[in-house]
Image (cartoon, rainbow, N blue to C red):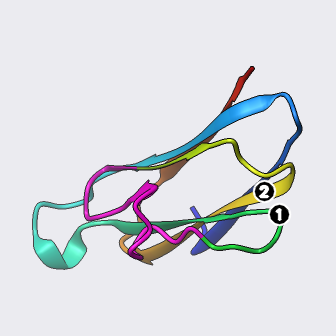
Amino acid sequence: SSPLSELEFEIDENFKSLLVTMNHSPGSIATDTQNDFDLDLLSPSGENFYLQSQTPKCNNTMQLVSECRMENPKMGLWRARVSRLRGEGHFQLVATGITK
C-alpha cells in the first residue's frame, strides 16, 4: 500500500448511520517493525474525525482494527483517508452505510 490512500463515498438522506473500518497486517513482533496506520474520516463540511484525537466517535490505537461510527451522518461527499506511519504492510478499508 502507498503511504496515503483515500476513499470517497456519497451519503444521502436515506442513511441513518455510517461505519468506516480499517484493518491491517501486524508486521513483525519487534516494535520497530510493526505496521502503524492512521485513519481520518472527513465530513462533507471538512470536519476531520481523526482517530488519534479526543473525538469519542472514533477509535485508533496500535490495534489491527480501527473504526469510526457516525449516527445521522451529514449528507454529501465523505472521505476516508489512510496514512501509513510505519511498516510495509497492507490495509483494508470498508465504508458501510445503514439506511433508514
Q: Nearer the viewer, residue 68 or 56?
A: 56
Q: Nearer the viewer, residue 28 or 70?
A: 70
Residue wearing tag 1: 44
Farthest-out residue, top:
100
Residue sitting at x 75%, y 20%: 100
Give the label on residue 78, or none. Answer: 2
* Residue span colored magenta: 49-66
Residue sitting at x 70%, y 31%: 16
Q: Is residue 87 above or below residue 7?
A: below
Left or right side of 45 for 95: left
Asked if the magenta segment contains residue 64, the reply would be yes
Farthest-out residue, left:
30
Query: Which three-letter amino acid code belongs to the residue tagged 2?
Result: Trp
Q: Nearer the viewer, residue 87 or 55?
A: 55
Left or right side of 38 for 9: right
Whole-percent x and y of residue 5?
Answer: 67, 65
